[in-house]
Image (cartoon, rainbow, N blue to C red):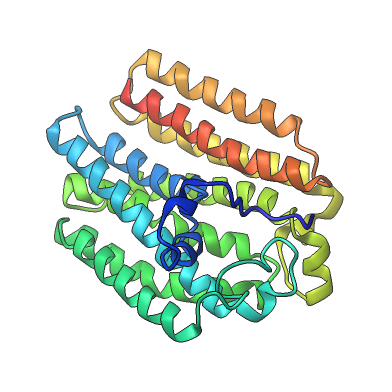
Amino acid sequence: MAFTDIRKKTWIECLPQAMRPYAYAMRLDRPIGWWLLLLPSWWGILMASPEITGQTAFLMGLFWVGAILMRGAGCMVNDLWDRDLDRKVERTASRPIASGQISVEDASIFLVILSLCGLANLFCLPLPAILLGFLSVPLIILYPLMKRYTWWPQAFLGLTFNFGALIGWSAVTGDYSLLSVGLYLACFFWTIGYDTVYAHQDKDDDLKVGIKSTALLFGDKSRACVYGFYIVAMLLFIGIAINSPLSWSGFIMLLLSFAYGGYRLAEWNPDDQESSLRMFRDNRDIGLLITIGLVI
């Protein structure tokens, strides 16, 4: 069987036949994507909040809905740009747009619907957060093109994917902060690390079709490079945490989450597709441990 991260025995198979391709196109069977989009937003909300209130819980729920919607919209943009390339890559050949289950016209209409829903969600936030949301749109549109022109599409993803850290912070404070920029940078380096791991699933096919990635750029040095990105992210995160209202017990939980990440990375085999997928998914657990530390 060809390697793919699409699993057919999921709850999506319980949906009406006409809805299934759209659910798969949004990657609703693989929540890891919206988790990684959501977690920086939650960190921004929690770090900016002097205490957890009903408003904090409301914002976290609002960003949860927004992450699912915008991750789905981002996937549609990505698959529309990459439909010809996806047909040539083992892991992505069965995606709904690449395989012809969804036409380009229908995918474009669905993208507009998702974008409008995301816009309605964004308008529930203060004006500074809304402005940041609009600033992220060009990055979302351009990101899928980066793998054609630069060896660093993972860095561009880091710039795109972590606007939630800035938006979450400004949703609480109604303003911008140097600390929120530090959090954004920490998430930026974390994203380069985990997306380099993710790119190792496709490196053989990427070489054949001319797609660039940090996985190919780093080659045999990938593990050391990913460690480096994680360490920079950790140091930035610790610096921000020291300047936020974090308890000692919460700080210890942060250190434990970083230790867990280092342990999982030590077990990663860059030449094994399944190992790369497992390590990529482990980042959700690392992020949830950080979230628990911030809640504490």
| Relative height, residue 279 to residue 188 (above, below) | above
Image location of residue 20, percent across then percent down: 46, 62
Quick check: 180 above or below 47?
A: below
Q: Dividing the image into 4 quarters, which one contains the N terminus?
A: bottom right
Q: Is residue 7 left or right of residue 270?
A: left
Query: Residue at point 51% right, 51% down?
Result: 188
Q: Position of residue 150 (x, y in %)?
A: 67, 73
Vertical order, 215 against 228 (above or below) = below
Which sits in the foreground, 199 or 127?
Answer: 199
Residue lying farthest to the top in this orientation? 249
Q: Residue placed at 82% from the left, 69% from the top?
A: 207
* Visible residue check, residue 182: no
Residue 19 point in image, percent of width and height: 41, 64
> Could you tell me which quadrant the C terminus lies in?
top left
Left/right placement of residue 165 relative to residue 289 reads: left
Residue 263 falls in which quadrant of the image?
top right
Number of callouts: 0
- Residue shown at the point (19%, 36%) measured from the top left: 56
Can residue 266 be seen by looking at this rendering?
A: yes
Comparing 161 with 65, the one in front is 65
The percent position of residue 262, horizontal first and vertical second, equals: 66, 29
Of 216 and 48, the residue lying toward us: 216
